[in-house]
Image (spheres, coloured by chain):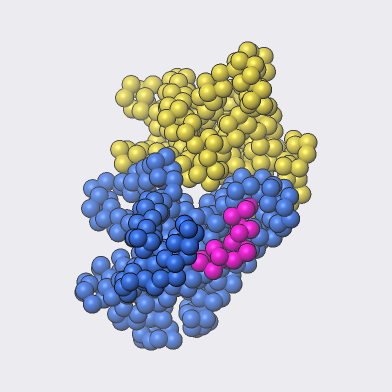
Chain colours: A yellow, B blue
Amino acid sequence: MQPEIFFQTLVNGLFIGGIYSLVSVGLTLIYGVMLILNFAHGEFLMLGMYVAFGFFTLFGLDPYVSVPLAALIIFLVGAAIQRGLIQRVLKAHSLNQIILLLGISTLIMGLVQFFLTAEPRHIRVPYETEVLVLMGLRLNIPRLVSFLASMLISVSLFLFLQYTKTGKAIRAVSQNRDAALLMGVNVKFIYLLTFGLGTAVTAMAGVFLTPNYKLIPTIGQSFSVIAFVVVVLGTMGNFIGAFFGGLIIGVVEVFAGYFFGGDMKIVASMLVFILVLLFKPAGLFGRKSA
Amino acid sequence: MNNEMTKKSDAQMPKSALHRWLRFAFVDWEQTQLVISMFILALLALTPLVVRSPYYMGIIILTVLYAYIGISWNIVAGFAGQLLIAHIIFVAFGAYTTIVLYNNFGVSPWFGLIASGIMAALLGAVVAFITLRYGLKADYFALFTIATMVALKALFLKWEFVGGAVGMGLRIHEPGFAKMIFQNKEPYLYISLGLVFLGLLAQYLIYRSKMGKYFFAIREDEAAAAALGVNTSLYKTYALLIGSAMAGIGGGFYVMYVTFVEPPQVFDLALNVELVMAGPIIGGLGSLLGPLLGALVNKPLAELIRGFLSVTRSGSSLIVYGSFLILAILFLPRGLSGLLHDAYLKLRVLIYKEEKE
């Protein structure tokens, strides 16, 4: 493999890995706080894409302009779903929780397909294929933007969790729910906020994908599966783990695609998943066995 | 005085044949469920006398098959409480095994079904080895089955030997018993009824056995079960092996009946929800009657949606199934058999009270 191709592939991997990071950070945050596997996670990414599509077709808004709008809308949708449905099963058997979330995922997919059809949609922007050449590397502008923005959002979310009062409350609930409750943290509100935030960042990731990806109602599923692999790799509930795990999986996928063809990407992720479960089940950032 | 009276009434023979039968059926809830199941199977076996249209016969056959596959999932998810989400991978493995053996090697599907069970159980063993060790988070298993489904889909799409993206169609020969190809639909019905009969029996025996008790202990609290000396990894693996083998056999029959299999069709979460999960959840996960009862509601409903709604708009079946799962978990977590159980408890009191008087 020539060095130029190697670096080009590496950059491509990091670019898509940034999106994976953002999606996985949302998933791991929800899991860490609520101990619930959000099986509908990818559907919120898909909803984010469709919100951007809606603003684009109705008002001609550039997808990048609709990022905050999509985040806000999906935050509200996520919070409503959390309060209305998920809050009721937090004490139930995990199987019931998963079935409920699978139901939510199926319902969201069905609604989008029903009202907007399964026909692929495309947001056409003039800069879709524009390229920035930097030291011999060809950087696709929308992918570069999505990468930088994903990094920025992930880091801001991290700082928010680390340094603000609300962020500290979220981390407190994730460490010990009862202790946080006794310290006067409104746990119910924290759950609402966390689910809203987790889904909102995922929706933003979806919007950043729109210049390069066609919109179909089932697009969320593949991202869900990748996010599952990433959060296990980076230790479930660990924010930093999900962040770096996303980048790693992105790079692994792109190299696997280069050597074995694009269809084998998911198989490569699967192999990483198997290796982690066999040899490092606590994940890269776990202290003890999971 | 009081004691004497109860003794006397217990010794008394029930008055009528009906009463004797009722007493048998109401000994305990498990036995009652078995009796109701067999009654439903008998009714289904008689349907060819009434149902003449092949279309409706087809729905009945698939209803029975859905019940069978539901049972196989119920043992893993309902009894042992394992977070087995993409159970469809075992069905798919079984379907491919039977059709490949028949098309490429001319192996009779009767042996194919057995091979399907073995192949699916092998896949189950691999999955169990990777994810069901004690101490691993149960959530990993849930994530792993879904990831496996997606990865297998990618592999099967590329694997030309099993038809690749085109899939495989059953090579149609002259109908014959050894080839499990029949002119009429009735033989398919009786084969599927035989499968459900065996499935229900297996389910009942497991429920009653020591292994079944271990499954329930693991479902309720794995750490506590392990502390009491249950080898939880082993019994979780047993549950998965039984469930996957049964699902594999069901997949083998499925492909003989629908005569076609392709990767996007079988490695699909929507089909997984419809074929595997919806029935037992509607009927009552973890109960003996649940999968059968749920299938009776589920499959005809699926056909109804496909027949009437999907013509106008796609996505309607997803909406219905999604709502079903949500509503069942929120409002009817014990399913239809939970309702029946409540009724049973009331009736039981009536029957035994009457006897004492």
Against B303, is A42 above or below?
above
Choose top left, top right, bottom left or bottom right for residue B230. bottom right
Magenta portion: prevailing SS class: helix
Q: Does the magenta stretch include residue B332?
A: no
> Quadrant of the image for the C terminus of chain B?
bottom left
Against B64, is B105 above or below?
below
- Going by the picture, which residue comes out furthest to the front? B1
Residue B274 image position (x, y, % from top left): 40, 54
Q: Which of B79 and B299 is in front in this view?
A: B79
Q: Can residue B5 be seen in this view?
A: yes
Residue found at x 35% / y 56%: B350
Q: Does the magenta stretch include residue B217?
A: yes
Residue A88 image position (x, y, % from top left): 47, 33
Q: Which of B287 and A71 is in front in this view?
A: B287
Residue found at x 62% / y 53%: B217
Magenta stretch bounds: B203-218
Q: Nearer the viewer, residue A86 or B225?
A: B225
Residue B170 image position (x, y, % from top left): 42, 75
Residue found at x 33% / y 69%: B19
